[in-house]
Image (cartoon, helix red, strand yellow):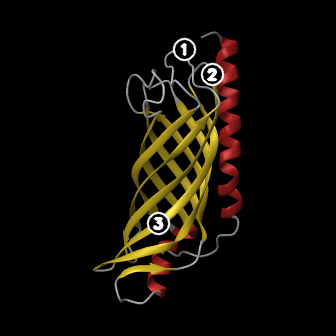
Amino acid sequence: MDSSQAKCCWDNYIKWAAISLLPVMVAGARAGDFSFESAGVAAANKATDDGGARTASFSFESAGARFGAGASSSNRDFHQAEAFVDWNLPWHWDLGRKWDLQSRVGLSAGWLGNNHSGGFVGTPGAMLAVGRERFPLWIEGGSGPTVISRWEFETKNFGDAVQFTSHIGLYCDMPWHLRLGYRFQHMSNASLSESNPGLNLHVLALSYRF
């Protein structure tokens, strides 16, 4: 890779990183307390203790930025930077012993590429999060369709503009409504194309809890 290609790729990555951080900076300006209680826990605390599925309102849950890097030697030159917004769905379940299961939906948009080139990536998806009342750590998993504007790269051909992304990870609720998270993420086209190498990423997230 020559210097002009490296500069172009780096400039694109910085541009999307800056765009991705905007929701965190804007939301962070609204933070003013040291609450460790997440939106899902707050909803559970307000609900009755009769167990089973419970309904609440559709509401903003969090917004922030995620940054990912290749999780294996074949993916090490790929990176992803994106902004995201998550909403709590009206359904959550009391699992007993102060454990709660919350359903959510999310939307993300950003940049995906390698050291040579990249393009747009966007994913709507559904998620489930499991946590314990007043405990800051939650486990989350989810899946959804993904659209990429570029699928042919020097080292990989993802086969098609339509992909599917799944993840599992955990996050920790911090003071000032901030949240830190990690996920292991897999993207592939589910064999819709003859070429389906897939992409595994380690992803870190910083977000603001509403």
Residue drawn at 57 percent across, 25 percent down: 151
Q: Is residue 173 above or below residue 92?
A: above
Q: Is residue 112 above or below residue 45?
A: above
Q: Is residue 1 above or below residue 163?
A: above
Q: Marks 1 and 3: which is nearer the front?
A: 3
Q: What residue is disc 2 on?
A: 117
Q: Are marks 1 and 3 in contact (CB under 8 Å)?
A: no
Which image quarter is the N terminus in? top right
* Furthest residue in direction left, as rendered: 97
Secondary element at image label 1: loop
Indicate left or right for 53 with 154 as reference: left
User: Is tag 1's residue or tag 2's residue first in the polypeptide sequence?
Assistant: 2
Count of picture labels = 3
Secondary element at image label 2: loop
| Residue 27 seen anywhere in this rendered image of the structure | yes
- The numbered dot on residue 154 is 1
* Depth check, front residue: 77 or 146: 146
x then y, percent, for residue 80: 56, 36
x then y, percent, for residue 187: 46, 36
Q: Amino acid at mark 1?
A: Glu
User: Is tag 2's residue or tag 3's residue first in the polypeptide sequence?
Assistant: 3
Q: What residue is disc 3 on?
A: 103
Which quarter of the figure has residue 113? top right
